Image (cartoon, helix red, strand yellow):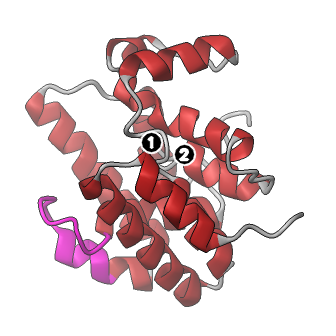
Amino acid sequence: MRTIDLKKIRKAMEKALDARRYEHTLGVEYTAAALAMCHGASIKNAQLAGLLHDCAKCLSDEKRLSLCEKHNISVNDIERRNPSLLHAKVGSFLAMEEYNVTDPDVIHAILNHTTGRPGMSLLEKIVFVADYIEPGRNKAVNLDEIRKLAFANLDMAMIRILEDTLQYLEECGGDIDPMTRKTYEFYRTGKEETDGR
């Protein structure tokens, strides 16, 4: 695998994202690296996935949908109604195509950073949690508690994030991706079967 220059990726993200999203991205890179140090994952992979997790976030809905159509990326009904939800799928595609990422774990961490999935790898969990707890975030309930939990027990932090996310979406009437609920049930019940992947 060829080595990827994180400085170049940072510069590319500064161009691709608006200022607020770029600031968030640096926060996720930093937090993912800290969680990787704590939990024994690859720091560089955590940084790379953190930097690229939102690389498709500032594309227009039309652009995201057309990339999915052009490259046979599946789109469910919820995503079609709300194409901003496609940023993880499109982002994992762009990570491979535009940023030459070949490590499947990094690609999956980008792909699953919003909904999670049953049976996530350590890196996937790290990026999922880092996205929620990075220093720039300040609106989520139970954030202080989840931040502490993330460094003590990653799975418990994930369960709390998924629980709070589902509760928030139910209260505000937002669309819930079925994978978010599936992931929550998987980790809440401690099931070790996967969803067929």
Position above or below: 46 against 91: below
In the rendered image, is residue 155 in sight? yes
Other-residue count near label 2 (Cα within 10 Å), few / some / many at <14 / 14–19 / ≥20: many
Q: Nearer the viewer, residue 195 or 138?
A: 138
Other-residue count near label 1 (Cα within 10 Å), few / some / many at <14 / 14–19 / ≥20: many
Q: Secondary structure at mark 2?
A: loop
Q: Nearer the viewer, residue 170 or 93?
A: 93
Q: Nearer the viewer, residue 51 or 123?
A: 51
Query: In the rendered view, does 194 fall on the left or right side of 166?
Result: right
Q: Quadrant of residue 3?
A: bottom right
Query: In the rendered view, does 186 fall on the left or right side of 97?
Result: left
Residue 5, percent from left and from top: 69, 71
Residue 90, percent from left and from top: 56, 32
Q: What's the residue type where badge 2 is placed?
A: Asn
Position above or below: 193 against 143: above
Q: Which residues are magenta?
A: 134-148
Q: Identify the residue position indicated by label 2 in the image.
A: 112
Q: Which mark is residue 115?
A: 1
Q: Quadrant of residue 171?
A: top left
Q: Say whether marks 1 and 2 touch (CB < 8 Å).
A: yes
Screen quadrant of the N terminus: bottom right
Magenta span: chief secondary structure: loop
